[in-house]
Structure formats: structure tokens, C-alpha cells
Image: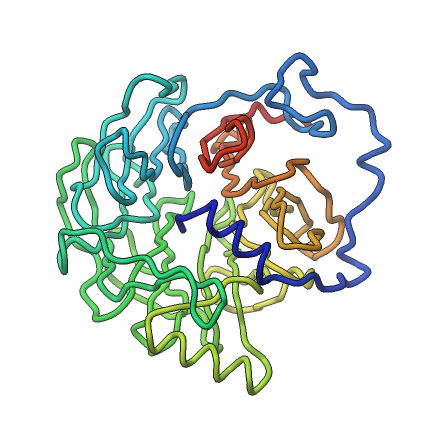
């Protein structure tokens, strides 16, 4: 999702801290361990022991959701950098050794409508992403508040497309009425998981790479989204804002009827790739989101503001897939999110407000990972 700075600001205004369960309290051992970061790199904060090195990739606008090609040679990401001649999020392609301080990466979406959530296909020659361009070539409006609360728009004009690396759309994968977005691809290369409102609620679905054999895998009221497969393709991790009380259910349904969701209270859930054995992974309070599997398949890295009294900062955390061993990874005072490991496990791409001069820009960073 975009409007990252506004997201952080609105959490400051409208989010409240909840008490964590004992098993998911952040361990204090990390602060006692020997710091192993590159101390001469100003982009790495002293406590960030898992970062051997780090490089800033972009220098302006909101840049997020950078995903690796299967061969780890390229990244696809979304940006609304106005210097790149876009007025809302479009998809851009980069080689992993590139930076974009004074130059612009190639745009591989149409430049029409709003796009989100691109991902490489196994051949490394095609990508999938969601776009609103079939309904309207203009950027859709972005509502930010409803009744004083921060919201995300869920555009019913989003569909999922396949494009080549020159930006040519070669196939449309979804045709249902309503929101079809947030697609990611299994590391096995056989399945796509995505979020859709085709059932009347925001549920997770899987389909084959060619769009066939669509299967609904969640079926409980609430927003299920941002899903990713485990390295062996057997499990799925996702975020969910599931309402429980009558008041929460009423508010959720009313917002969804207007194409909106409120993301200030989200927890992480894990299940098998077919939706079976569904388990709630976190119970931290506030917003826990953008989860991704550690290369081992035994841990999850994610973004959270659960330690924040006023809604920020957001930092990266890691937790075992049984809900134990919560550990803080980054130590920002603003915003770190969208962590994604390379397929070989040697690098971590993420978005951050660090080194932006105190402004609103959210940029991409690539860190060398060490354990």
C-alpha cells in the first residue's frame, strides 16, 4: 500500500498500544549481544546486528514493495516519484546493483491508472501486478480518513495482469467484479496467492500461474491480505484485521461497502498453502503487517508499531513460526517496512524513512544479511 508517510502520521493520531502476550514479548537478549554491524555505515543504526552492509537505492517519493526476480538479478518495485513522470504508483524495474539518485529506472507498467503489488514470474522474463487502468486511465482518488480514522482504499477496479519486462501486457489473469490485487508467487513457481472481494469479503485465494484453478483459502470476516508463500511453497503468511465485537463488525462492513478498510489493528496469521491448519501467529496489538518468510522457513520477518505509544515508529521484527522468540531487527525512529529476502537469503530489501533529511520520502534499501 502507498501513502506511507501519511500512514505513519495517521497511526500517530489514531492508534493506541495494546499489551502483548507473554510468549511474544520482544527478547532483551539482542541488546546484550555484540554489535556486528558496519559501524562506518551511517545507514545502519548501532543495534542492527543483522545488517553487514546497506545501500540506499532510491532518493525521492514513496518507493515500496520491492520483490526479487527468481535469479536474484533484478527487483521490481512501485513508486510515485513525481520526478519519474508519474502521478500515482507505477511499476519500475532495476538491476540489483543500480541506484537512482539522478537517473530513472525503466517503467514496466502502462503508466495508466494506479498499480500495486508486482511480482516476478519464474521465467524472470515476466511480472504480474494489479492495475485499475481498464476502468479509468486516470489515478483514482485516495481517501485517507473516514470519521476521523485512517483508511485504505480497496478499489474494485483492480485486476491482475501479466506483463513482459518491456511493459507489454500479455495476459489478464482475473476478470471477476471487485478487488483483485496483492498477488505473490510461490518459490516453487506453480501458484499465485492474492486477495479478492469476489465472495463479498476480503479473502485469500490461490490460482495456477496461468490463472486457472482458483481456490478460496480463507473464509472468516475481515481483511486478509499481503500474503506470501514459504520457501518450500507449503505455507502462507498474511496480515489480517479481523473484527470481533459487534461494533467492530458493523464498522468493518460499512467501510467495506464503500471500498475501504481500516488497517490500524492487524495481526499475522499462518496456514498451509491450501488454507488448512490456520493459526494466529501474533497477538501484539496495533499494526503488524508486511510479513515475509526467513530463508529457513522457520521464522517470519515483519513490520510493526506494537511497541509504539503514539503509533510510530514502525520497525522490523522477526518471530518463529510457532509465535515464540520475537526479536527486534531495526531500530528506526520513523518507518521501516516491506522486508523481502532474496531467494539465496543473502540480502534483504526493505523500505525506510531513514536518511531522508526529516522529510516525507520513503526509499528502498538493500542490506547484506548476516547471522
Q: Position of residue 224 (x, y in %)?
A: 46, 65
Q: Which residue is the extreme one toward the top?
A: 40
Which quadrant of the structure image shows residue 88?
A: top left
Identify which residue is drawn at 37% across, 19% down: 101
Q: Position of residue 295 (x, y in %)?
A: 57, 38
Measuring from the top left, give residue 30's x and y in whole percent: 80, 36
Q: Is residue 106 above or below residue 221?
A: above
Horizontally, residue 52 falls left or right of residue 157, namely right
Which part of the image, by quadrant, shows the C terminus? Answer: top right
Asked if 101 appears above or below 282 in the picture, the reply is above
Residue 15 at x, y percent in the picture: 61, 61
Q: Residue at (34%, 39%) from the top-left corner?
A: 78
Please tell me whether residue 100 is drawn above or below residue 214 in the rendered image: above
Q: Give the left or right position of residue 303, taking residue 38 as reference.
A: left
Residue at 26 percent of width and 41 percent of height: 90
Which is more toward the observer, 297 or 131? 131
Is residue 122 or residue 308 the one in the foreground? 308
Question: Residue 35 or 369: which is nearer the viewer?
Answer: 35
Amino acid at each position: 500500500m502507498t501513502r506511507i508517510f501519511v500512514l505513519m502520521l495517521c497511526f500517530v493520531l489514531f492508534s493506541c498500544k495494546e499489551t502483548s502476550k507473554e510468549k511474544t514479548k520482544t527478547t532483551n537478549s539482542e541488546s546484550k549481544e555484540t554489535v556486528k554491524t558496519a559501524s562506518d555505515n551511517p545507514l545502519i543504526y548501532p543495534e542492527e546486528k543483522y545488517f553487514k552492509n546497506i545501500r540506499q537505492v532510491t532518493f525521492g517519493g514513496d518507493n515500496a514493495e520491492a520483490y526479487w526476480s527468481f535469479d536474484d538479478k533484478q527487483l521490481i518495485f512501485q513508486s510515485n516519484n513525481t520526478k519519474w513522470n508519474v502521478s500515482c504508483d507505477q511499476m519500475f524495474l532495476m538491476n540489483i546493483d543500480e541506484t537512482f539518485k539522478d537517473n530513472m529506472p525503466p517503467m514496466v507498467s502502462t503508466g495508466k491508472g494506479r498499480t500495486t503489488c508486482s511480482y516476478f514470474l519464474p521465467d524472470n522474463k515476466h511480472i504480474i501486478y494489479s492495475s485499475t487502468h481498464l476502468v479509468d486511465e486516470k489515478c483514482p482518488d485516495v481517501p485517507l480518513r473516514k470519521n476521523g480514522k485512517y483508511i485504505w482504499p480497496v478499489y474494485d477496479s483492480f485486476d491482475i495482469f501479466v506483463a513482459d519486462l518491456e511493459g507489454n501486457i500479455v495476459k489478464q489473469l482475473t476478470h471477476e467484479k471487485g478487488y483483485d490485487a496483492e498477488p505473490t508467487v510461490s518459490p516453487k513457481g506453480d501458484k499465485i496467492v492474492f486477495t479478492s472481494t469476489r465472495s463479498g469479503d476480503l479473502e485469500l485465494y490461490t490460482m495456477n500461474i496461468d490463472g486457472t484453478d482458483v481456490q478460496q483459502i480463507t473464509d472468516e470476516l475481515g481483511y486478509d491480505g499481503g500474503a506470501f508463500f514459504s520457501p518450500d511453497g507449503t505455507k502462507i503468511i498474511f496480515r489480517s484485521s479481523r473484527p470481533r465485537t459487534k461494533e467492530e463488525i458493523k464498522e468493518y462492513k460499512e467501510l467495506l461497502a464503500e471500498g475501504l478498510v481500516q488497517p490500524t489493528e492487524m495481526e499475522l496469521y499462518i496456514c498451509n498453502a491450501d488454507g488448512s491448519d490456520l493459526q494466529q501467529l501474533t497477538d501484539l496489538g496495533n499494526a503488524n503487517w508486511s510479513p515475509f518468510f526467513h530463508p529457513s522457513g522457520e521464522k517470519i520477518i515483519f513490520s510493526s508499531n506494537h511497541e509504539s505509544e503514539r503509533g510510530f515508529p514502525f520497525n522490523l521484527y522477526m518471530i518463529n513460526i510457532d509465535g515464540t522468540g520475537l526479536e527486534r531487527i531495526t531500530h528506526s525512529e520513523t518507518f521501516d517496512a516491506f522486508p523481502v529476502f532474496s531467494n539465496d537469503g543473502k540480502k534483504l530489501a526493505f523500505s525506510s524513512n531513514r536518511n531522508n533529511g526529516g522529510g516525507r520520502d520513503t526509499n528502498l534499501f538493500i542490506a547484506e544479511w548476516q547471522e
